[in-house]
Amino acid sequence: MIDTNAIFNINTTANFNKLALQVFQYQFEHNKVYRSFCDLLYVNPSDVNRIEAIPFLPIQFFKTHQVLTGKVEVLKVFTSSGTTGKQTSKHYITDLNLYETSFNKGFKQFYGNIEDYVILALLPNYLEREGSSLIHMINALINQSEHLESGFYLDNFVALKETLLRLDAEGKKTILIGVSFALLDLIEQYQFNLKHTIIMETGGMKGRRKELIRDELHTRLKRGFGVNEIHSEYGMTELLSQSYSNGNGVFACPNWMKILIREPQDALTLQGDKKTGGINVIDLANVNSCAFIATQDLGRKLSHTTYEIIGRFDTSDIRGCNLLLI
Protein backbone atom coordinates (compact mmCIF):
# COMPACT_ATOMS: atom_id res chain seq x y z
CA MET A 1 0.00 0.00 0.00
CA ILE A 2 0.99 3.62 -0.55
CA ASP A 3 1.00 6.05 2.38
CA THR A 4 -1.45 8.66 1.06
CA ASN A 5 -0.36 11.16 3.71
CA ALA A 6 3.09 11.14 2.10
CA ILE A 7 1.57 12.26 -1.21
CA PHE A 8 0.42 15.59 0.20
CA ASN A 9 3.59 16.18 2.20
CA ILE A 10 5.98 16.16 -0.77
CA ASN A 11 8.37 19.11 -0.47
CA THR A 12 11.33 18.27 -2.72
CA THR A 13 11.88 16.94 -6.22
CA ALA A 14 13.65 13.93 -4.75
CA ASN A 15 10.61 13.16 -2.57
CA PHE A 16 8.32 13.42 -5.59
CA ASN A 17 10.45 11.17 -7.78
CA LYS A 18 10.85 8.52 -5.09
CA LEU A 19 7.12 8.37 -4.37
CA ALA A 20 6.21 8.42 -8.09
CA LEU A 21 8.36 5.33 -8.65
CA GLN A 22 6.69 3.64 -5.66
CA VAL A 23 3.23 4.46 -7.04
CA PHE A 24 4.26 3.14 -10.46
CA GLN A 25 5.33 -0.20 -9.00
CA TYR A 26 2.16 -0.38 -6.88
CA GLN A 27 -0.10 0.32 -9.86
CA PHE A 28 1.84 -2.06 -12.08
CA GLU A 29 1.12 -4.82 -9.57
CA HIS A 30 -2.48 -3.96 -8.66
CA ASN A 31 -4.05 -2.23 -11.70
CA LYS A 32 -5.01 -4.79 -14.36
CA VAL A 33 -5.56 -2.24 -17.14
CA TYR A 34 -2.29 -0.43 -16.49
CA ARG A 35 -0.38 -3.71 -16.11
CA SER A 36 -1.68 -4.93 -19.48
CA PHE A 37 -0.66 -1.63 -21.06
CA CYS A 38 2.85 -1.86 -19.58
CA ASP A 39 3.13 -5.50 -20.70
CA LEU A 40 2.32 -4.48 -24.27
CA LEU A 41 5.23 -2.06 -24.10
CA TYR A 42 7.49 -4.68 -22.49
CA VAL A 43 8.05 -2.38 -19.50
CA ASN A 44 8.76 -3.84 -16.06
CA PRO A 45 9.41 -1.94 -12.81
CA SER A 46 12.88 -3.49 -12.66
CA ASP A 47 13.70 -1.47 -15.79
CA VAL A 48 12.30 1.83 -14.47
CA ASN A 49 14.53 3.89 -12.17
CA ARG A 50 13.47 7.41 -13.16
CA ILE A 51 10.08 9.02 -13.73
CA GLU A 52 10.80 9.75 -17.40
CA ALA A 53 10.82 5.97 -18.05
CA ILE A 54 7.33 5.41 -16.60
CA PRO A 55 4.69 4.56 -19.24
CA PHE A 56 1.79 7.03 -19.50
CA LEU A 57 -1.65 5.50 -20.03
CA PRO A 58 -3.54 7.18 -22.93
CA ILE A 59 -6.48 9.06 -21.45
CA GLN A 60 -8.88 7.31 -23.85
CA PHE A 61 -8.72 4.21 -21.61
CA PHE A 62 -10.98 6.03 -19.15
CA LYS A 63 -13.69 5.84 -21.84
CA THR A 64 -13.32 2.14 -22.57
CA HIS A 65 -12.08 0.49 -19.36
CA GLN A 66 -12.58 0.58 -15.61
CA VAL A 67 -9.22 2.01 -14.57
CA LEU A 68 -8.84 0.91 -10.94
CA THR A 69 -5.96 0.01 -8.67
CA GLY A 70 -6.75 -2.67 -6.11
CA LYS A 71 -10.03 -4.35 -5.23
CA VAL A 72 -11.84 -1.63 -3.33
CA GLU A 73 -15.49 -0.57 -3.38
CA VAL A 74 -16.30 2.26 -5.79
CA LEU A 75 -17.97 5.09 -3.88
CA LYS A 76 -18.57 7.57 -6.71
CA VAL A 77 -18.13 7.83 -10.45
CA PHE A 78 -17.08 11.14 -12.00
CA THR A 79 -18.02 11.48 -15.68
CA SER A 80 -16.87 13.85 -18.40
CA SER A 81 -19.17 15.98 -20.48
CA GLY A 82 -19.82 14.69 -23.98
CA THR A 83 -22.09 15.10 -26.97
CA THR A 84 -24.97 12.71 -27.49
CA GLY A 85 -23.87 9.29 -28.70
CA LYS A 86 -20.22 9.75 -27.76
CA GLN A 87 -18.46 7.80 -25.04
CA THR A 88 -17.66 9.73 -21.89
CA SER A 89 -14.76 9.22 -19.53
CA LYS A 90 -15.48 7.62 -16.18
CA HIS A 91 -13.24 8.01 -13.15
CA TYR A 92 -14.09 5.43 -10.49
CA ILE A 93 -13.47 6.91 -7.04
CA THR A 94 -12.79 4.62 -4.10
CA ASP A 95 -11.69 7.34 -1.64
CA LEU A 96 -13.40 10.73 -1.85
CA ASN A 97 -11.17 12.01 0.92
CA LEU A 98 -8.20 11.83 -1.48
CA TYR A 99 -9.95 14.12 -3.94
CA GLU A 100 -11.09 16.54 -1.26
CA THR A 101 -7.66 16.67 0.34
CA SER A 102 -6.12 17.29 -3.07
CA PHE A 103 -8.30 20.21 -4.10
CA ASN A 104 -8.27 21.77 -0.63
CA LYS A 105 -4.48 21.63 -0.29
CA GLY A 106 -4.04 22.66 -3.92
CA PHE A 107 -6.25 25.72 -3.48
CA LYS A 108 -4.44 26.69 -0.29
CA GLN A 109 -1.03 26.33 -1.96
CA PHE A 110 -1.93 28.85 -4.65
CA TYR A 111 -4.54 31.14 -3.04
CA GLY A 112 -4.34 30.77 0.73
CA ASN A 113 -7.24 30.08 3.07
CA ILE A 114 -10.58 29.41 1.40
CA GLU A 115 -12.29 31.19 4.30
CA ASP A 116 -10.85 34.48 3.04
CA TYR A 117 -12.81 34.33 -0.23
CA VAL A 118 -16.33 34.60 -1.52
CA ILE A 119 -16.70 31.91 -4.20
CA LEU A 120 -19.09 32.60 -7.08
CA ALA A 121 -19.53 29.87 -9.69
CA LEU A 122 -20.84 30.33 -13.23
CA LEU A 123 -20.78 26.76 -14.55
CA PRO A 124 -24.10 26.16 -16.33
CA ASN A 125 -23.02 23.24 -18.51
CA TYR A 126 -21.61 21.39 -15.48
CA LEU A 127 -24.67 22.05 -13.31
CA GLU A 128 -26.93 20.68 -16.03
CA ARG A 129 -25.53 17.13 -15.81
CA GLU A 130 -24.66 14.50 -13.23
CA GLY A 131 -21.23 13.31 -12.14
CA SER A 132 -19.11 16.45 -12.54
CA SER A 133 -15.93 16.41 -10.45
CA LEU A 134 -15.65 20.19 -10.91
CA ILE A 135 -19.08 20.75 -9.35
CA HIS A 136 -18.12 18.49 -6.44
CA MET A 137 -14.98 20.58 -5.88
CA ILE A 138 -16.60 24.00 -6.21
CA ASN A 139 -19.54 23.00 -4.02
CA ALA A 140 -17.10 21.97 -1.28
CA LEU A 141 -15.15 25.24 -1.63
CA ILE A 142 -18.39 27.24 -1.45
CA ASN A 143 -19.40 25.42 1.74
CA GLN A 144 -15.98 26.07 3.29
CA SER A 145 -15.76 29.73 2.30
CA GLU A 146 -18.00 30.75 5.24
CA HIS A 147 -19.51 33.62 3.25
CA LEU A 148 -23.26 33.69 2.76
CA GLU A 149 -22.82 35.26 -0.69
CA SER A 150 -20.93 32.23 -2.04
CA GLY A 151 -22.93 30.08 -4.44
CA PHE A 152 -23.72 28.84 -7.94
CA TYR A 153 -25.37 30.91 -10.65
CA LEU A 154 -27.10 29.43 -13.68
CA ASP A 155 -28.89 31.95 -15.90
CA ASN A 156 -29.53 34.66 -13.29
CA PHE A 157 -27.05 37.18 -14.64
CA VAL A 158 -28.81 40.13 -13.01
CA ALA A 159 -28.31 38.69 -9.53
CA LEU A 160 -24.71 37.76 -10.34
CA LYS A 161 -23.97 41.27 -11.63
CA GLU A 162 -25.43 42.91 -8.54
CA THR A 163 -23.55 40.54 -6.22
CA LEU A 164 -20.24 41.10 -8.01
CA LEU A 165 -20.59 44.88 -7.89
CA ARG A 166 -21.61 44.92 -4.23
CA LEU A 167 -18.84 42.57 -3.07
CA ASP A 168 -16.20 44.48 -5.03
CA ALA A 169 -17.42 47.83 -3.66
CA GLU A 170 -17.18 46.38 -0.13
CA GLY A 171 -13.61 45.27 -0.81
CA LYS A 172 -14.33 41.58 -0.23
CA LYS A 173 -11.91 39.13 -1.80
CA THR A 174 -13.95 37.28 -4.40
CA ILE A 175 -13.30 34.56 -6.97
CA LEU A 176 -15.67 34.21 -9.91
CA ILE A 177 -14.97 30.84 -11.50
CA GLY A 178 -16.72 30.16 -14.76
CA VAL A 179 -16.65 28.28 -18.03
CA SER A 180 -15.43 30.51 -20.85
CA PHE A 181 -18.66 30.82 -22.85
CA ALA A 182 -20.68 31.81 -19.77
CA LEU A 183 -18.17 34.47 -18.73
CA LEU A 184 -18.35 35.90 -22.26
CA ASP A 185 -22.14 35.84 -22.12
CA LEU A 186 -22.03 37.83 -18.88
CA ILE A 187 -19.74 40.60 -20.15
CA GLU A 188 -21.74 40.94 -23.35
CA GLN A 189 -24.65 42.03 -21.17
CA TYR A 190 -22.75 43.98 -18.49
CA GLN A 191 -19.43 45.76 -18.17
CA PHE A 192 -17.41 45.79 -14.95
CA ASN A 193 -14.42 47.53 -13.38
CA LEU A 194 -13.50 45.10 -10.61
CA LYS A 195 -10.70 45.80 -8.12
CA HIS A 196 -10.99 43.00 -5.56
CA THR A 197 -12.23 40.11 -7.71
CA ILE A 198 -10.32 37.25 -9.35
CA ILE A 199 -11.83 36.03 -12.63
CA MET A 200 -10.95 32.37 -13.20
CA GLU A 201 -11.86 30.51 -16.38
CA THR A 202 -12.05 26.73 -16.45
CA GLY A 203 -11.66 26.12 -20.18
CA GLY A 204 -13.44 25.78 -23.49
CA MET A 205 -16.67 26.74 -25.12
CA LYS A 206 -18.19 23.23 -24.82
CA GLY A 207 -19.85 23.61 -28.23
CA ARG A 208 -21.68 26.80 -27.19
CA ARG A 209 -19.41 29.22 -29.06
CA LYS A 210 -16.58 29.29 -31.55
CA GLU A 211 -13.33 28.32 -29.83
CA LEU A 212 -10.96 31.22 -29.21
CA ILE A 213 -7.22 31.15 -28.71
CA ARG A 214 -6.26 31.94 -25.13
CA ASP A 215 -4.90 35.43 -25.83
CA GLU A 216 -8.09 36.54 -27.55
CA LEU A 217 -10.31 35.01 -24.85
CA HIS A 218 -8.33 36.61 -22.03
CA THR A 219 -8.21 39.99 -23.79
CA ARG A 220 -12.02 40.02 -24.04
CA LEU A 221 -12.45 38.91 -20.45
CA LYS A 222 -9.96 41.46 -19.09
CA ARG A 223 -11.70 44.23 -20.99
CA GLY A 224 -15.18 43.12 -19.92
CA PHE A 225 -14.41 42.64 -16.23
CA GLY A 226 -11.95 45.52 -15.96
CA VAL A 227 -9.19 43.34 -14.49
CA ASN A 228 -5.47 43.12 -15.27
CA GLU A 229 -5.18 39.33 -15.40
CA ILE A 230 -7.38 36.31 -16.00
CA HIS A 231 -6.70 33.28 -13.84
CA SER A 232 -7.26 29.74 -15.10
CA GLU A 233 -7.87 26.29 -13.65
CA TYR A 234 -6.65 23.17 -15.47
CA GLY A 235 -8.26 19.95 -14.37
CA MET A 236 -10.16 17.05 -15.85
CA THR A 237 -12.43 14.17 -14.94
CA GLU A 238 -9.55 11.71 -15.06
CA LEU A 239 -7.44 13.64 -12.51
CA LEU A 240 -7.89 14.37 -8.82
CA SER A 241 -5.62 17.44 -8.83
CA GLN A 242 -5.67 20.83 -10.53
CA SER A 243 -3.10 23.28 -11.85
CA TYR A 244 -3.67 27.02 -11.62
CA SER A 245 -2.57 30.05 -13.60
CA ASN A 246 -2.65 33.57 -12.18
CA GLY A 247 -2.20 35.16 -15.58
CA ASN A 248 -0.64 34.94 -19.04
CA GLY A 249 -1.63 31.29 -19.35
CA VAL A 250 1.33 30.12 -17.25
CA PHE A 251 0.30 27.18 -15.03
CA ALA A 252 1.91 25.68 -11.97
CA CYS A 253 1.16 22.32 -10.32
CA PRO A 254 0.69 21.44 -6.67
CA ASN A 255 3.63 19.59 -5.13
CA TRP A 256 2.21 16.11 -5.84
CA MET A 257 1.58 16.74 -9.54
CA LYS A 258 4.01 17.10 -12.45
CA ILE A 259 3.77 17.80 -16.18
CA LEU A 260 6.00 16.17 -18.81
CA ILE A 261 5.79 16.87 -22.56
CA ARG A 262 5.92 14.09 -25.17
CA GLU A 263 6.75 14.39 -28.85
CA PRO A 264 3.60 14.91 -30.95
CA GLN A 265 4.35 12.04 -33.35
CA ASP A 266 5.99 9.63 -30.91
CA ALA A 267 3.97 9.01 -27.76
CA LEU A 268 6.85 7.20 -26.06
CA THR A 269 9.47 9.95 -26.38
CA LEU A 270 9.62 13.01 -24.12
CA GLN A 271 10.42 16.55 -25.25
CA GLY A 272 12.75 19.08 -23.67
CA ASP A 273 11.64 22.39 -22.15
CA LYS A 274 10.01 25.04 -24.33
CA LYS A 275 9.08 22.54 -27.06
CA THR A 276 5.42 21.96 -27.93
CA GLY A 277 4.02 18.47 -27.54
CA GLY A 278 1.45 16.30 -25.83
CA ILE A 279 0.87 16.83 -22.13
CA ASN A 280 1.64 13.87 -19.86
CA VAL A 281 0.47 14.22 -16.28
CA ILE A 282 1.74 12.60 -13.12
CA ASP A 283 -0.98 13.05 -10.51
CA LEU A 284 -0.04 11.08 -7.41
CA ALA A 285 -3.49 11.73 -5.92
CA ASN A 286 -4.67 9.21 -8.55
CA VAL A 287 -3.10 6.44 -6.49
CA ASN A 288 -6.32 4.37 -6.69
CA SER A 289 -6.83 4.74 -10.46
CA CYS A 290 -3.82 5.65 -12.65
CA ALA A 291 -1.32 8.33 -11.72
CA PHE A 292 0.37 8.46 -15.14
CA ILE A 293 -1.82 9.80 -17.95
CA ALA A 294 -1.10 10.88 -21.53
CA THR A 295 -3.71 13.57 -22.25
CA GLN A 296 -4.95 14.85 -25.62
CA ASP A 297 -3.84 18.38 -24.75
CA LEU A 298 -0.92 20.19 -26.35
CA GLY A 299 1.41 22.20 -24.18
CA ARG A 300 4.88 23.49 -23.60
CA LYS A 301 6.99 23.25 -20.46
CA LEU A 302 8.41 26.66 -19.60
CA SER A 303 10.52 25.74 -16.56
CA HIS A 304 10.91 23.02 -13.96
CA THR A 305 7.65 24.10 -12.31
CA THR A 306 5.61 25.94 -14.97
CA TYR A 307 3.95 25.15 -18.29
CA GLU A 308 1.38 26.49 -20.73
CA ILE A 309 -1.49 24.85 -22.57
CA ILE A 310 -1.55 25.41 -26.33
CA GLY A 311 -4.71 23.54 -27.29
CA ARG A 312 -5.79 20.03 -28.19
CA PHE A 313 -4.63 17.45 -30.70
CA ASP A 314 -6.76 17.07 -33.79
CA THR A 315 -7.97 13.49 -34.21
CA SER A 316 -5.46 13.01 -37.00
CA ASP A 317 -2.62 14.09 -34.72
CA ILE A 318 -3.06 11.62 -31.87
CA ARG A 319 -2.02 8.50 -33.72
CA GLY A 320 0.96 8.11 -31.40
CA CYS A 321 -1.47 7.38 -28.58
CA ASN A 322 -3.95 5.54 -30.79
CA LEU A 323 -1.32 3.00 -31.73
CA LEU A 324 -1.01 2.14 -28.06
CA LEU A 325 -4.74 1.37 -27.88
CA ILE A 326 -4.65 -1.35 -30.51
Image (tube, helix red, strand yellow):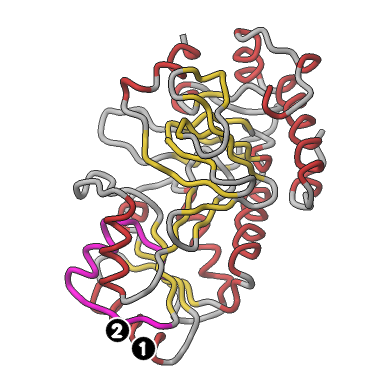
Q: Nearer the viewer, residue 124 or 106?
A: 106
Instruction: In the rendered view, tell whether residue 313 sits above or below residue 167.
Output: above
Residue 190: in magenta span:
yes
Q: Is residue 154 visible?
A: yes
Hey, what amino acid is under mark 2? Glu
Proximity of marks 1 and 2: CB atoms separated by less than 8 Å: yes
Q: Is residue 77 visible?
A: no
Query: Regarding mark 2 in the picture, which secondary structure is present there?
Result: helix
Instruction: In the rendered view, tell whether residue 141 sits above or below residue 147.
Output: above
Q: Which residues are magenta?
A: 176-195
Taking the image as shown, residue 21 lies to the left or right of residue 146, namely right
| Residue at left offset 45%, top offset 72% | 175
Q: Which mark is residue 162?
A: 2
Residue occupying the far left of the picture? 189
Mark 1 lies on residue: 166
Q: Nearer the viewer, residue 272 or 27?
A: 272
Which percent across, then down, holds residue 99?
A: 62, 49
Which percent across, then down, holds residue 257?
A: 64, 44
Quadrant for residue 273, please give it: top right
| Residue at left offset 29%, top offset 84% | 162
Q: CA distance from mark 1 to mark 2?
A: 6 Å
Residue 228: in magenta span:
no
Taking the image as shown, residue 4 lies to the left or right of residue 81, namely right
Which percent across, then down, holds residue 106?
A: 62, 57
Instruction: In the rendered view, tell whether residue 250 sits above or below residue 188.
Output: above
Which percent across, then down, holds residue 194?
A: 36, 81
**Which image quadrant: the N terminus?**
top right
Residue density around tag 2, few if under 14, some if 14–19, many if 20 or more, within 10 Å: few
